[in-house]
Image (cartoon, grey):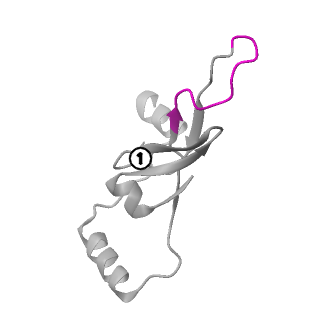
Amino acid sequence: MPISFSQAALGTQIDIPTLEGKSTIKIPSGTQTHTILRMRGKGIADVHTGDKGDQLVKIVIKTPIALTRRQREILSELLDKEETIKPEKDFFTKFKEKFI
């Protein structure tokens, strides 16, 4: 389900299509792209037991393509105040640091 940067950062509630119609799901503040949220009992029913499964919702944060001047100003202010994000170390780098 695509959401905006603002929705991901601040948190929101959105409607998700399910087998039984639309259902609302809460997006927690600070949600990252590719986060998978579970909607219990909203999935396909088990053939043998009839119990409903869960519906999984993958969150994808969409970056805006065209920004207004005001939006650019706001994001520039935010960028000036942000800390630099360092990439996570991969397995081999962590291994080297521990054992070599």
Q: Is residue 29 left or right of residue 39?
A: left
Q: Is residue 47 magenta?
A: yes
- Along the viewing direction, whichever of 85 and 77 lies nearer the viewer: 77
Residue 43 placement (x, y as % from top left): 63, 31
- Along the viewing direction, whichever of 16 and 33 lies nearer the viewer: 16
Q: Is residue 39 left or right of residue 27?
A: right
Q: Is residue 63 left or right of residue 52?
A: left
Residue 89 placement (x, y as % from top left): 46, 43
Question: Please, is residue 46 above or below residue 30 in the view?
Answer: above
The residue carrying pointer 1 sits among few (fewer than 14), some (14 to 19) or many (20 or more) residues within 10 Å by Cα, namely: some
Residue 95 placement (x, y as % from top left): 49, 31
Q: In which quadrant of the rendered view does residue 92 lie? A: top right
Identify the residue at image location x=58%, y=32%. 42
Identify the residue at image location x=52%, y=28%. 40
Range covered by the magenta-colored residues: 37-49
- Along the viewing direction, whichever of 78 and 9 lies nearer the viewer: 9
What residue does disc 1 label?
27
Q: Is residue 82 left or right of residue 48?
A: left
Question: Please, is residue 84 above or below residue 26 in the view?
Answer: below
- Along the viewing direction, whichever of 58 and 91 lies nearer the viewer: 58
The residue most toward the left is 81
Identify the residue at image location x=66%, y=38%. 19
Q: In which quadrant of the rendered view does residue 9 lie? A: bottom left
The residue most toward the top is 49
Residue 71 placement (x, y as % from top left): 36, 80
The residue most toward the front is 20
Q: Main secondary structure of the magenta part?
A: loop
Q: Is residue 25 magenta?
A: no
* Element carrying mark 1: strand
**Total labels drawn:** 1
